[in-house]
Image: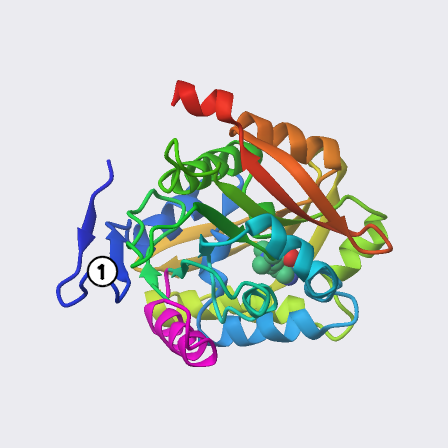
């Protein structure tokens, strides 16, 4: 069941929109995850104030090649990517954060119908939208506060767009297990379809995804020598202590990042160093020695695997851009029009 609700004081036209899906409470979700087998926590819980800071530090680490590599690809091929997006498009960015990478594209898109940054964090979204609007005075910026894993209505731009193009950089798709990734790519297809009519072109998707490579390189990217990723991982327990009155002993858990070849993913875990019981919102949760909490899955793709996943969601690749080491791909996909007729 899903109810969207427009919050008061936010007109849908010209000022963006505020759409919230009734979310399960943090405490219920955390307890469900920790009572499961294996124990799990959603990676979305990493990003409190300190977690977001630590993630910014991760992006600067020598071992963490992802941000640097994708930014280089976007810099080098910005014009070609902008040409694919085309004139008068509505550009919708999911999980826009600070919209840093987007600027590389916006610099080459003087004729965009509008830019719609979508993020769950209202304060960050509004601040970033304001900065983009002042840096690009001719551009209509329509921030939408929404959980992008659920369908949400697009704010309407003043100009009628020729097509809708979704922008999803950062390898964020890798956080979703294959069935959820396909679901999300279907949500993107529905968003991109909104702008399509017989008179307009097929919707597009510009997405960044990380490639399978030497496991040693992957494991180091998620277990850096400065210990920043370990701190980022453990910080989720600090957050639960603060927000749920839990009593995790951060010294009693250690960070682990393991490549799991059968699943094409890095698994980030917090491993309990001893048998212990933790209290979370009044509920006792027991850990055996060496028992793990899985905190994040980071899926890596072969080009074929990504194409198969995209096809299952109704997308076809039109152009791919890579770095010289072939560590990472940025791809432009279009809606598969045959699937579109089926709905
Ligand atoms: C933000 C999901 C792309 O998986 O590489 C970085 C998160 N976790 N280091 C990733 C992350 C640990 C990151 N994503």
Residue 135 is covered by the magenta coloring: yes
Disc 1: which residue: 13
Which residue occupies 21% across, 58% down? 12
Give x and y (percent) for residue 147: 36, 52
Viewer-nearest residue: 296 or 329: 329
Give x and y (percent) for residue 108: 59, 65
- State whether residue 292 appears in this view: no
- In this rendering, position of residue 308 left or right of residue 198: right
Viewer-nearest residue: 179 or 80: 80
Looking at the picture, does residue 75 appear above or below residue 85? below
Please tell me how many numbered marks the rendered image carries: 1
Q: Which color mode does the image show?
A: rainbow
Which residue occupies 42% across, 77% down? 137
Q: Quadrant of the N terminus?
A: top left
The quarter of the picture showing ligand 1: bottom right
Looking at the picture, does residue 330 appear above or below residue 18? above
Give x and y (percent) for residue 98: 49, 71
Viewer-nearest residue: 213 or 26: 213
What residue range appears in magenta? Answer: 120-140
- In this rendering, position of residue 319 left or right of residue 250: right
Q: Quadrant of the C terminus?
A: top left
How many other residues sit within 10 Å of disc 1, few (<14), some (14-19) or many (≥20)? Answer: few
Which residue occupies 62% across, 53% down? 83
- In this rendering, position of residue 69 left or right of residue 144: right
């Amino acid at each position: 069941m899903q109810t969207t609700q427009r919050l008061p004081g936010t007109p849908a036209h010209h000022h963006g929109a505020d759409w919230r899906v009734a979310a399960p409470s943090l405490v219920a979700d955390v307890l469900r995850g920790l009572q499961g087998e294996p124990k799990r926590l959603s990676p979305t819980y990493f990003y409190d104030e300190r977690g977001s800071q630590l993630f910014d530090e991760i992006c600067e680490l020598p071992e963490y090649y992802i941000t640097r590599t994708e930014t280089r690809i976007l810099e080098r091929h910005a014009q070609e990517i902008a040409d694919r997006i085309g004139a008068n498009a509505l550009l919708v960015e999911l999980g826009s954060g600070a919209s840093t990478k987007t600027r590389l594209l916006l610099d080459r898109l003087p004729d965009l119908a509008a830019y719609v940054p979508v993020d769950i964090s209202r304060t960050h979204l509004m601040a970033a939208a304001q900065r983009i609007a002042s840096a690009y005075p001719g551009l209509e910026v329509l921030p939408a506060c929404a959980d992008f894993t659920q369908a949400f209505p697009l704010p309407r731009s003043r100009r009628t767009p020729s097509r809708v193009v979704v922008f999803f950089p950062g390898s964020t798709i890798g956080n979703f297990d294959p069935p959820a990734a396909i679901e999300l790519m279907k949500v993107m297809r529905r968003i991109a379809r909104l702008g399509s009519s017989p008179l307009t072109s097929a919707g597009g998707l510009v997405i960044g995804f990380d490639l399978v490579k030497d496991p040693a390189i992957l494991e180091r990217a998620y277990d850096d020598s400065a210990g920043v990723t370990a701190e980022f991982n453990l910080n989720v327990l600090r957050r639960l202590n603060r927000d749920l009155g839990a009593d995790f002993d951060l010294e009693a858990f250690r960070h682990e990042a393991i490549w799991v070849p059968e699943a094409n993913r890095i698994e980030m875990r917090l491993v309990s160093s001893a048998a212990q019981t933790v209290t979370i919102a009044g509920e006792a949760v027991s850990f055996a020695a060496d028992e793990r909490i899985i905190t994040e899955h980071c899926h890596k793709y072969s080009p074929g695997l990504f194409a198969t996943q995209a096809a299952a969601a109704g997308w076809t690749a039109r152009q791919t851009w890579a770095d010289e080491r072939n560590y990472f791909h940025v791809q432009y996909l279009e809606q598969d029009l045959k699937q579109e007729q089926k709905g």
